[in-house]
Amino acid sequence: MTTALATSPLKAIDRCDSCGAQAYIRVVLSEGELLFCGHHGRRHEPKLRPIALEWHDETSRLHEKPEPVDD
């Protein structure tokens, strides 16, 4: 796995490994990676953060306002 792949933006197709909701957090571990929604990412953060090689958090996107669409 490369760092470029690990830090690429999460997409709508990326799903939380705990509940299946859209993933906004990617945790890279030496054995692979885990994807979490904001809720489950925060729940598991205390245990995973110390062993994570990378913690990619896009939960700030949850508060973005969508661009207006011109018809």
Image: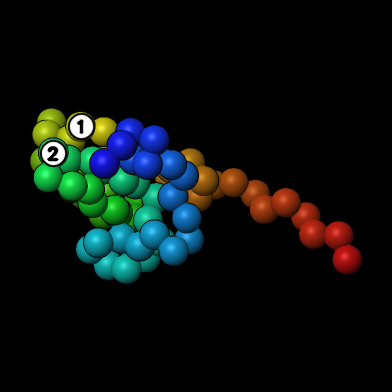
In the figure, is residue 11 to the left or right of 7? right
Question: How many marks are shown on the rendered structure?
Answer: 2
Q: Nearer the viewer, residue 29 or 43?
A: 29
User: Can you see residue 34?
Assistant: yes
| Residue at mark 2 | 30
| Residue at mark 1 | 53
| Residue that appears at 26% across and 33% down | 54
| Residue that appears at 18% across and 47% down | 32
Whether 2 is drawn above or below 38: the answer is: above
Q: Are marks 2 and 1 in contact (CB under 8 Å)?
A: yes
Disc on res. 25: none
In the figure, is residue 32 to the left or right of 58? left
> Given the image, on which type of amino acid does mark 2 rest?
Ser
Q: Quadrant of the C terminus?
A: bottom right
Q: Residue 24 appears at what percent x and percent y?
A: 39, 50
Coloring applied to the structure: rainbow
Q: Alpha-carbon neighbours of circle 1 within 10 Å: few (<14), some, or many (≥20)?
A: some
In three-dimensional space, the C-alpha distance between marks 2 and 1, rounded to whole angstroms, equals 7 Å
User: Can you see residue 57?
Assistant: no
Q: Alpha-carbon neighbours of circle 2 within 10 Å: few (<14), some, or many (≥20)?
A: few
Q: Residue 18 appears at what percent x and percent y?
A: 23, 63
Q: Quadrant of the N terminus?
A: top left
> Given the image, on which type of amino acid does mark 1 rest?
Leu
